[in-house]
Amino acid sequence: MRDSRLDEYARLLVERSIGVQAGWQVQVRATPLARPLVEALLEQIARRRAYPLLQMSFELIGGPFAREAPLDLLRVAAPLQQRVWKEADAFIAIWSPENTREGSELSEERKAALQEASAPMRDRTMSMSAPWVIAEYPVLSGAQDAGMTLPQYEQFIFDSVLLDWDAEGARMRKIADVFDAADEIRIVGEGTDLTVSLTGRTGAVDDGHVNMPGGEVFYSPVEDSAEGVIEFCEFPAVYYGREVVGARFRFESGRIVDATARSGEEFLIRTLDTDEGARRLGELGIGCNPGIQRYMKNVAFDEKIDGTVHLAVGNSYTFTGGTNTSSIHWDIVKDLRAHGELYADGKLVQKNGNWVIR
């Protein structure tokens, strides 16, 4: 008998996150490990009189084709896949890896080629011209990374996704109002004193849409505004299954002019040199999910930790006013719960992870 929480989860994704309408074609991507949730999703989509387009694969990043295809073939998605990306009405991806290091064996050229091939899909999702959500399913690899048993990990996921999202949305809207009204945001913490401009930019509140778990307010900072230093000394930064420990960026006129790390520095710099936009910010996010209090080595959770901020280098969200383009979008989390401060136009709004706004 299927866990009733999975039915509640599937209903949340279909009805709230995506808002599936009758007649829609909804692409669903997952691995076989997520079959219980996939089956619940297909049932919910059917009840909405819509069509699921199920794409199952053993690996969601990389895989045999990505390892062996000639680069010129890898850079362009199959015509039928491009048509799905163009014509599907909504997208659901279930992160359920057998191995959380998927894709780490690929060369930088192959990673860049995969990113180039998926550009048509990324254009639709980053502009929000089609609703989409990336959701988590509890698998053993994720539990191991988080230092949990699988039952503990399952409970953690359900505690962070099965929330009263209307109430969470109202709470986060008050936070967004403060940042929407501000021109300059200053982040202060260990090894960190960084300012960015939000002039003319409006934030988005993720109250159970886009990512699941939700629980963040996010912006696309003005592209040439970042000034100062930020050190991600609390948690490793993970990208394509590779870890970078102690990343430190120095910004001038919005661009990273110096990047170092205690380990993984070579990979960090190679990634930042992917293209011109990779050294600029595509996102400033503020973690707000009260159900997430610990680092999981999974950015879908870690960027939502209440009392953290995250910066994404690379591609920005056009629907929040961003104009930076890149084939990468790498979210890196900074913990402000110890000795951290956030300022909006010079006014302290958060101290040690606690809001001081009214």
Image (cartoon, rainbow, N blue to C red):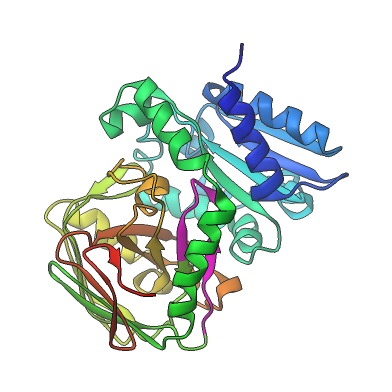
Residue 314 place in picture, x, y as percent: 42, 67
Residue 290 in sight in this render: yes
Q: Residue 148 sits in which quadrant?
A: top left
- Residue 25 forms part of the magenta stretch: no
In the depicted view, which residue is nearer to us: 262 or 92?
92
Q: Is residue 5 left or right of residue 130?
A: left
The residue located at (56%, 51%) in the rendering is 165
Q: Is residue 146 above or below residue 92?
A: above
In the depicted view, which residue is nearer to us: 82 or 346?
346
The residue located at (23%, 50%) in the rendering is 236
Q: Is residue 313 above or below residue 139?
A: below
Q: Is residue 146 left or right of residue 197?
A: left
Q: Is residue 163 above or below residue 233?
A: above
The residue located at (70%, 63%) in the rendering is 129
Residue 262 place in picture, x, y as percent: 11, 55
In the depicted view, which residue is nearer to us: 63 or 340?
340
Give the quadrant of the C terminus. Answer: bottom left
Q: Is residue 43 above or below residue 124?
A: above
Q: Residue 35 sits in which quadrant?
A: top right
Residue 224 place in picture, x, y as percent: 38, 86
Q: Is residue 143 left or right of residue 116?
A: left
- Residue 210 forms part of the magenta stretch: yes
Residue 333 place in picture, x, y as percent: 30, 58
Residue that lies at the very extreme toward the top in this rendered image: 1
Give the quadrant of the N terminus. Answer: top right
What is the span of residues highlighted in magenta in the rendered image? Answer: 201-217
The residue located at (28%, 44%) in the rendering is 295
In the depicted view, which residue is nearer to us: 56 or 207?
207
Residue 75 in sight in this render: no
